[in-house]
Image (cartoon, rainbow, N blue to C red):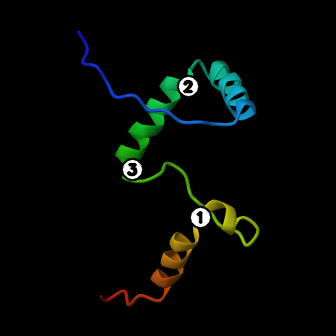
Amino acid sequence: MAAKGSYVRARVDDGLKRDVETILHTLGLNTTEAIRLFLHQIRIRNGLPFDLLLSEDNCDILLPNSMRQAALNSLYDDPAG
């Protein structure tokens, strides 16, 4: 008998969920399977399985100010430590 797993819950836009479920169905997957794949890829890569890219237009939307500031500060950090 398989061990019980943890539940992951997320609130998403109805239209997004519907569109994604249609795409996943075409791929032969359901949402739970896609989430499992996503989580496994994060563990395998030790990070997100895609690039996070910022443009001037979407920077405020994608990252909170504190994260943006930390990213900017890291540009000026001495790589030698």
User: Is 30 located above or below residue 80 in the figure?
Assistant: above
Q: Are marks 3 and 2 in contact (CB under 8 Å)?
A: no
Viewer-nearest of labels 1 and 2?
1
Q: Amino acid at mark 2?
A: Thr
Viewer-nearest of labels 3 and 1?
1
Location of residue 24 by image quarter: top right
Question: Helix or strand or loop: what does disc 3 sit on?
Answer: helix
Query: Which quadrant, please, contains the N terminus?
Result: top left
Q: Residue at x 47, y 51 (%)?
A: 48
Query: Which quadrant, please, contains the C terminus?
Result: bottom left
Residue for badge 2: 31
Residue for badge 3: 45
Q: Position of residue 30 (x, y in %)?
A: 56, 20
How many neighbours does mark 3 have within 10 angstroms: few (below 14), some (14-19), or many (20 or more)? few
Q: Which mark is residue 71?
A: none
Measured in 3D between alpha carbons, the distance from the residue under mark 3 to the one under mark 2, in whole angstroms, is: 21 Å
Q: Which mark is first along the chain, 2 or 3?
A: 2
Q: Residue at x 66, y 24 (%)?
A: 21
Q: Position of residue 9 (x, y in %)?
A: 49, 32
Residue for badge 1: 63
Q: Nearer the viewer, residue 66 or 25?
A: 66
How many neighbours does mark 2 have within 10 angstroms: few (below 14), some (14-19), or many (20 or more)? some
Residue found farthest to the top: 1
Q: Which mark is first along the chain, 1 or 3?
A: 3
Q: Amino acid at mark 3?
A: Arg
Q: Nearer the viewer, residue 67 or 48?
A: 67
